[in-house]
Image: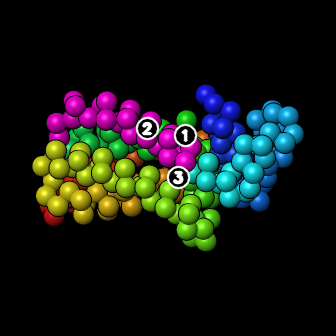
Amino acid sequence: MSRRQEIADAAIGLLAAEGMRGLTHRAVDRAAELPEGSTSYYFRTRQALLQATVERLADHTAADLAALQERAPSMTGADDLVEAAAWLLGQWLTTSRDRQLARYELSLEATRRPELRETLLAGGARVRALITRLLADSGVPDADVWARDLIAYGDGLLLDHLLSDPGELPDLRPKIRALLATVGEG
């Protein structure tokens, strides 16, 4: 892992723990256990640090999607899609929880910073493309339209469970199955 990635990962952790107000160059130095001034050496401005953090989140999401794609060849129907979606959301609620909290923080910030919004939208487009392909491969008509709905639903589930009991991973399969049943009827 490069020093820039290490700093961006520390920024992700800070965003998850303390929000946008807690994200300073010095705080990142402390979180990454780096000498004071290290973060500002690599990222001179707050904007540069935010951009690097958004890009690092996109890298992590790409890795998550690659892991999902490794599971995709064995998917043959709706039950496999349910399992894949539940697996991904489960990862994002547990091992990647901090990244999702940071993503929400940065998403709100991106409403005021167009340069961050562009990077977040590009990451979202990759997620949509994969979900569209998985739905189309499963025979879902209008897969691109349903992919947007499925992602919005999954994002809502994710946010709801991040805000509720963080220690308990719910069984998301029944909710995802119900939505996919609607997709099949549409």
Asked if the magenta segment contains residue 174, the reply would be no
Question: Residue 144: which quarter of the image?
Answer: bottom left
Is residue 26 rendered to the left or right of residue 76? right
Is residue 131 rendered to the left or right of residue 2? left
The answer for how far apart the CA atoms under marks 2 and 3 are is 19 Å
Residue 22, image x and y in percent?
Answer: 78, 54
- Residue 74 visible in this rendered orientation of the protein: yes
Residue 107, image x and y in percent?
Answer: 56, 61
Q: Which amino acid does label 3 sit on?
A: His
Name which residue lies at 80% across and 39% down.
38
Quick one: 44 or 143, which is closer to the camera? Answer: 44
Residue under label 1, please give it: 96
Please identify the quadrant where the N terminus is shown. top right
Task: Reply above or below: 38 against 100.
Answer: above
- The magenta-colored residue range is 55-77
The answer for how far apart the CA atoms under marks 2 and 1 are is 9 Å
Q: Secondary structure under badge 2?
A: helix
Residue under label 2, please give it: 64
Comes first in the chain, label 1 or label 3: 1
Q: Secondary structure under badge 3?
A: helix
Residue under label 3, please give it: 161
Q: Mark 1 or mark 3, which is nearer to you? A: 1
Quick one: 168 or 63, which is closer to the camera? Answer: 63
Label 3 neighbour load within 10 Å: few <14, some 14-19, many 20+: some
Q: Mark 2 or mark 1, which is nearer to you? A: 2
Label 2 neighbour load within 10 Å: few <14, some 14-19, many 20+: some
Task: Reply above or below: 105 against 78.
Answer: below
Please identify the quadrant where the C terminus is shown. bottom left
Residue 26, image x and y in percent?
Answer: 84, 46
